[in-house]
Amino acid sequence: MEGVLPMTELGTYLKEQRETLGISLEQIQSTTKIQKRYITAIEEGDYKQLPGAFYARAFIKTYAEALGLDVDEVFATYKRDLPEPETQPVVELSRRATYSKSTAPKKSVAKRWIPNIIIIALIFAIGVALYYGFQAFRDGDDTTTSTPPQSEVTIDEGDAPSEEANTPVAEEPKEEPAKEETVPVKKEEKKPLPVKTTVGQDITYEVPADDTMSVTIRIKKDASPSPFVGVRDTSLEGEALAPDHINASDPNPIVVKNAKTDVIRIRVGSIKGIDRILVNDQELKLNRSLLVQNIYLKKVATP
């Protein structure tokens, strides 16, 4: 049919990745600050709707980063689908713009040296005034009369205080009670909870717990782009245990307290933006080889 553009392989790939992560167009728009109509145009390969080839390539880069993809690999794989960069026009400078200071008329030598001569004359006059003022001060100081010598006073040895009377009596040092040394008790550090099984993007941990599970997910403050995180009971269709994290301005850390469930599912897009995940105050040993993960926390009875 005429008027319908064929979807590019790049646009189809980005759309499939977004739908696999369960992210809507509105969420991508909120994360990347790119208008939804531009994201739709990228997925449909309709680059004419974008404001130029430069912005098109920049939007595609930001979109791929938000999905946790390797931008260099995406650009290399779908190179033929990328819009060609625009050539920048060469702008010739006018005669007025290229006018240099060297062509400007120079001031005459006399006009340049007159201010310097005036400054030197003022400094010389100030120096002469200070010199004569100092000489007048010295002449006045020499005319002052000398003070009469003081009379000698003899002190009788009998009136002088004895050395014994002035000698303070040394006090005996008091013994301080011995301080009891306290030995700090080392807190036993818990080892990170290891991965139980890994199947594709699904990673399972077994959490020793008798009653409930509490989860804390800390996201790196400098993560770019900010990762997508969703926490649900058992599966994607289950009850949400915390609001989805989409933007860097969303609450951090994500906290779930005393969840009464046997399995918690954490959907993570771009694992490199996650700092750590704690379950019942025990850290998970994260597998960072997969950018997108489904982390299942399976409750098992404590030994």
Image: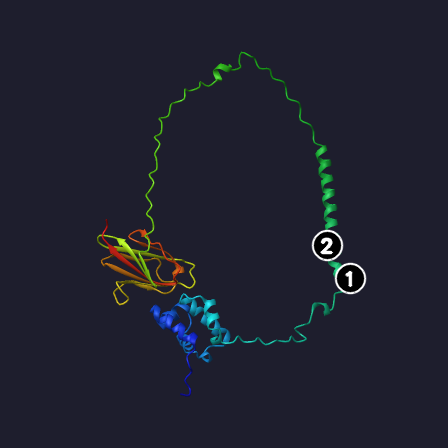
One can see residue 23 in this view: no
Q: Which labelled disc corresponds to residue 262?
A: none
Residue 75 horizontal side relative to residue 192, left or right: right
Give the farthest residue toward the bottom: 2
One can see residue 206 in this view: yes
Mark 2–mark 1 distance (CA, rounded to whole Å): 15 Å
Mark 2 residue element: helix
299 or 38, which lies in front?
Answer: 299
Answer few, some or many: residues within 10 Å of disc 2's Cα (few below 14, many 20 plus, some between 14 and 19). few
Q: Residue sitting at 72 percent across and 48 percent down?
A: 126
Residue 22 horizontal side relative to residue 77, left or right: left
Quarter in which the N terminus is drawn: bottom left
**Residue 62 picture location, percent across and down:** 44, 68
Q: Is residue 277 above or below residue 41?
A: above
Total marks shown come to 2
Name the N-terminal-most of marks 2 and 1.
1
The three-letter code of the residue at mark 1 reads: Ala
Mark 2 and mark 1 residues within 8 Å of each other at the beta carbon: no
Q: Is residue 6 above or below residue 61?
A: below
Give the farthest residue toward the top: 158
Q: Which residue is mark 2?
A: 119
**Residue 92 picture location, percent across and down:** 64, 76
Q: Which labelled disc corresponds to residue 110?
A: 1
**Residue 74 picture location, percent across and down:** 45, 69
Mark 1 residue element: helix
The three-letter code of the residue at mark 2 reads: Ile
Q: Quadrant of residue 272?
A: bottom left
